[in-house]
Image (tube, coloured by chain):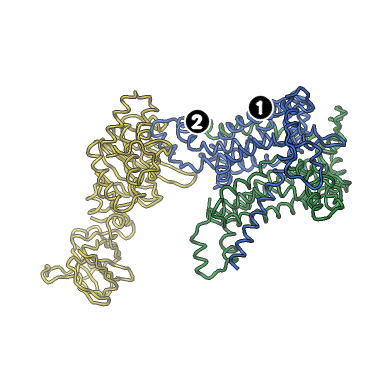
Amino acid sequence: MSRKFFSGPFILILPSILAIGFVIIIPLIFSFYTSFTSYKLTRPDSLFNFVGLRNYERLIDNTKFWYAFGRTILFLAVVLNLELLFGLGIALLINKITWGQRTLRTIMMFPMMFSPILVGFQWKYIFNDNIGLLNNFLYLFGYESAIPWLIDKYLAMGSIMVAEIWANTSIFAILLLAGLLGIPRDPIEAARVDGCNSWQVFKNITLPFLMPFIFIALTIRSLDVGRAYDIVHIMTGGGPAMRTELLWTMIARIGYKDANMGFANAMSYVSIILSIAFTYYFFTKLVQARRDLGQQ
Amino acid sequence: MAKVELKNITKKYGEVIAVQNMNLTISDNEFLVLVGPSGCGKSTTLRMIAGLEDISGGDIYIGDQLVNDKDPKDRNVSMVFQNYALYPHMTVEENLGFSLKIAKVEKEEIEKRVKDAVLILGLDDLRKRKPSQLSGGQRQRVAMGRAIVRRPDAFLFDEPLSNLDAKLRTQMRTEIKKLHQTLKTTIIYVTHDQVEAMTLADRIIIMKDGYIEQIGSPIEVFTKPANIFVATFIGSPPMNIIEGDLIKKENKLIIKIDDEINLECPQKIQSSLDNKNKIYLGIRAEDIMPKESNDNPSNNWCFQKSINLAEPLGTETQLFFTIKNKEIISRMYNPKDVKVGDKIDFQIDPNKVHFFDAETEKAIF
Amino acid sequence: MKQIRKIGFWFLVLFLLILICLPGIWIFVSAFRPNPEILSKPANWIPDRWTIHQFTQMFSINGYVSVPAFKYLMNSVIISSVSTVIAITIGMMGGYAFARFNFRGKNSIFLSLMLARAVPGISLSLPLFILFAKLGIINTSFGVILVYVAMNVPFTIWLTDGFFRQIPKEMSEVARTDGCTRLQAFWNVELPLAGPGIGAAAIFAFLLSWNEYALASIITRTVHSKTLPIGMMDYLDEFTINWAGMCAIAVVMIVPALVLTFIVQKHLVSGLTFGGVKG
């Protein structure tokens, strides 16, 4: 048996575990420790100044943090739902096209391959109140007063959401399209014969078949929600007046600008748990959806 | 060419036992068929011989060598899989020569052996094709060719014909049989199809739930099934099994089937029926025949039943009726029109009836 | 009625296309025009004068360098390529193990690897920064490569696991009874068959490294190791933005990404949907 143990799968997985251990697990353990100290980058000796749960207590008392936390949840809820909805719509649309479907699918993938930093920059440009494309476009229709998309306290968040949705809807669209293309014809035709209308067919046949694909997309997407940091960082930097501050930008500001590592790390942990919770939730849903469909 | 020996082979998956204490010697050049319902452990046995599954206990010998801890590559056996498992990225020729190339055989030798195999299997026109350009039967041949080229000690076939349609299956069956005669090598063949087993095998092993139920030649397992399972598994339609009560009457032992059917128990088995009050009768459909005028009048194994269903098949008509709520099939070899509800006189040849113990389900001879 | 619906349908598709493509086209166009023209109102879609000024300056063809974009490009290419090769090699081994072996805790190990991937870059950057500074690999290509390998491994495992699963198990088994060792069977049979899929996974890993910002912005400090996404910020001054320069460097970033996307698309989708969870 021991022969099998050493020649077996564990040897193959070991390098992966080592790489992740060194770059992700060890730093996380370290930051977990520092979240219990008053560590400041500028004062290395503070690394050993153990303060117990004080950073977490400060976190709980910090209204700005809770605003950022709530905003992050809201942001993710809105953005993920809209991406799913639009993605589904686009997938259904493209599924109907018979001519040029593959080309369209390829074009659809483009936003996926834009660096988030580029997406941020691109939309910062579009939403720029002075030279932005959008205001320029509105100007054509005689709307001459420049709308301060990224400066107005309400519009800024919406603008960021638009950028985020633009960048990530295609993941949903492409995976859902793959799901649609894989749906067997027979159940749909059977349902038609049984007297279902288009909506009933969609609700009772198409959607259940799509569920695993929806959760695949959500799982993959949730692995990367943190990348929204790049977009926000470029577009508004958390402004105006912290109106677009998300957990991630707040971590960066407190950790690097204020050099307050201990506090920032405590916050990091909240964001990590948030990300992992999202991923875990969707992953278990995915397993369940596959089981429901009788797939392994 | 070599004999294969299994000694006390056991395979467990966690708590589940797939194969239990199996002992088996496959002699040189023998065509052995493992047959049984799915999940009976026949494929697992084959895969253990190939080295694709670890064995949980026991020893496997190929030739005279213990191969328990040998990798598949060192066992010098070839396997043909149900889905052929041809290498899709290689041509027919490359598929055939692959194992030799891995073994670093010289190029001329590879070419020669591939050519031989191609000729034996009639693949000459297809040498440059990729598997995706072949039909099912052709793929099957390439898969066999790949095994032949290696000149293994034993061929292992894992349900090789079950992906083919009925007509092709019959044809390939014949080819495999011929191949065995040409190559004179040990073949271990797994199938769930009892017709395949009967037609191909020198010896059949019938398995169920990890145990061997019976080993024997095709004729043996058909005419002398060791138990009810084998009796119903081998032969088509399956053997009729009828339950009967044993009653002593005027020094005679009577088998009471139902109110109308009482049969006299043959002398030869009476001694094994002491203290028993129940017995199972196994009768093949061809041994329950409608009575004809010229039949032996001394046969008293007769009864009358009304027909539930008649299926004319041309050369014969299968008649269905019930005894004690169990459906019984009879074969009528001189077909005449029979309508549902017709009452027909049947007779059974007592010499062809199989008797099984009611508790152990084992045959009583 | 049917006619109207059809027109509406195509109008929707067209609208979609515009929405997806327009921002990119605008960037592309703007990279080739003089800076003042970008600011013109109303928007000018076809430049009056095409110029490659931004590119010549970026790649210091006329001697004057404001932003060492060529150096950034080289850093990006090296870091992305090397980290991709390593990540694919390691990840492929893992993916193969998940696809072909059954072992205790398989699903939980798989899930843990995925969850490791879910840690947001910015949360990781603080401790990584300190750790790397202590080890002296801050601001080195080696450090960045190491990070990207770890970031890419989980996803590569997900993808390759899917691709290996699509190859029937019998392929490897028949090769082994044909006289191959497990490694030979992998090398001669499974790897060539999974080739396109692994290529797709590689390109995906490459793009992730190519586009990454949050971590690189912390652990790279100078021209020595900065990648293009970080270099792009050079055009962002405290008060002014050199839009044309930014557009130009954006083009340098996008073009390879688009070409690679084009190559990868088919296999990427099948790998994503196939891999992942199983009993």
Q: Nearer the viewer, mark 2 or mark 1?
A: 1
Vertically, is C87 above or below B227? above
- Callout 2 amino acid: Arg
Pointer 2: what residue?
A3
For the residue pair C170 and A237, the one nearer the viewer reads as A237
Relative horizontal placement of residue A178, taking residue C251 as reference (left or right): left
The chain holding disc 2 is A
Q: How crowded is mark 1: few (under 14 residues within 10 Å), some or many (20 or more)?
A: some
Picture coordinates of residue B272, whole percent (x, y): 24, 57
Evaluate whether residue B54 shows in this view: no
Q: Chain C is drawn in which colour?
A: blue
Number of marks in the image?
2
For the residue pair A251 and C62, the one nearer the viewer reads as C62
- Disc sitting over residue C78 in the figure: 1
Relative horizontal placement of residue A26, taking residue A3 as reference (left or right): right
For the residue pair B3 and C72, the one nearer the viewer reads as C72
Q: In the displayed orientation, state which residue is furthest to the front.
A: C48
Q: Residues within 10 Å of mark 2 (few under 14, many from 20)?
A: few
Evaluate whether residue C87 shows in this view: yes
Q: The N terminus of chain C is located in which quarter?
A: bottom right
The residue depicted at 87 percent of the width and 43 percent of the height is A58
Give the distance between the C-alpha atoms of the residues marked 2 and 1, in whole angstroms: 40 Å
The residue depicted at 55 percent of the width and 44 percent of the height is C266
Q: Colour of chain A?
A: green
Picture coordinates of residue B138, whole percent (x, y): 33, 43
Q: Colour of chain B?
A: yellow
- Callout 1 amino acid: Ile
Picture coordinates of residue C30, whole percent (x, y): 74, 39
Picture coordinates of residue B285, whole percent (x, y): 24, 63
For the residue pair C227 and B114, the one nearer the viewer reads as C227
The chain holding disc 1 is C
Q: In what element is the residue under mark 1?
A: helix
